[in-house]
Image (spheres, rainbow, N blue to C red):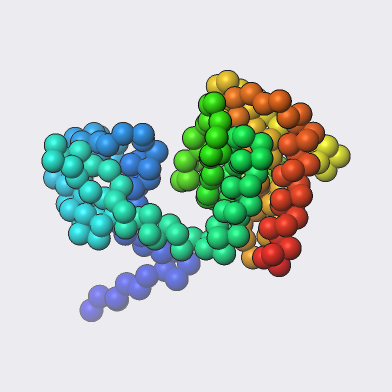
Amino acid sequence: MSIPEFADPKAAPAHSQTLSRGIRMLEILADTDKPMTIVELAAALDVHRSIAYRILRTLEDHGLVVRDPAGLVRLGARLAALARGVSRDLQATTRPVLTRIANELGMTAFVAVLDQGEIFTLVSIEPRQAHATVAQQPGTRHPLHMGAPGIAIQSGLSAAQWAALGHPETRRSEAGEVVALGYASSHNEVIPGLSSIAVPLLVPGESPASLAVVYISSLHSPTDIGAVLTAAARTIVAELS
């Protein structure tokens, strides 16, 4: 009589490969600025075209992706509706503040959050009137060690939070200067030719975040921009606390 085998309770839980691939397909589409073909998606996922097609059909059924008459795939409106529920209070509170900052300074204002060790743009507002503006699309990502938003977030992380990220070699020395300066700054890092100013946005119950602007050039000094952002961050935290 054979002895039945039981799963090791200490073993890592099984994951759904199909679900993982579906999520990865959404991430791939979110990271591109143009629709993709099924062939391109299959190559990006490193799977056979038939597998990519089945995943695509499932996502289509839920309205998360759509295909145009040429068969090109892009993210669907349903995904945007789901995204509105993410940090709903933070988004609702920051939108009017970001609008005021964008129009006052004449530059794109946004909130960036720490997500899976990367910087994720949660919400952004472009100024109504400006000769040249910079688009900072919600959902865009960049490494934590690049740019003012990441530096500002790093400055507010506790030792335990930083250790949990697992990549101490990327901690920026500038993070230690944020408290003294009042803001973090960067130029020519995430996007060549652009500058950014950011301040920590530490809201209880929310992921570590920063309030930031990105611009090509400005008549405002970094110190003045930092002061505007700091005051705005205090307003947001007070409203949400």
- Identified at 78% across, 35% down, the residue is 224
| Count of marks, rendered view | 0
Residue 77 is left or right of residue 123, and the answer is: left
Judging depth in this view, the residue of 22 and 222 nearest the camera is 222
Q: Where is residue 214 drawn, in percent x and y?
A: 60, 33
The quadrant holding residue 217 is top right
Q: Where is residue 136 drawn, in percent x and y?
A: 51, 38
Judging depth in this view, the residue of 209 and 81 nearest the camera is 81
Tell me if residue 75 can be seen. Answer: yes
* Farthest-out residue, right: 180
Q: Where is residue 205 drawn, in percent x and y?
A: 64, 65
From this view, report whether residue 206 is shown above or below residue 216. Answer: below
The quadrant holding residue 40 is top left
Q: Where is residue 19 drawn, in percent x and y?
A: 31, 57
From this view, report whether residue 99 is shown above or below residue 11. Answer: above
Judging depth in this view, the residue of 143 and 139 nearest the camera is 139
Residue 99 is left or right of residue 47, and the answer is: right
- Identified at 37% across, 70% down, the residue is 7
- Identified at 68% across, 58% down, the residue is 236
Residue 193 is left or right of residue 240, and the answer is: left
* Farthest-out residue, bottom: 1
- Identified at 35% across, 73% down, the residue is 6
Image quarter of the C terminus: bottom right
Tell me if residue 42 can be seen. Answer: no
Image quarter of the N terminus: bottom left
Residue 132 is left or right of residue 28, and the answer is: right
* Farthest-out residue, top: 193
Judging depth in this view, the residue of 84 and 47 nearest the camera is 84
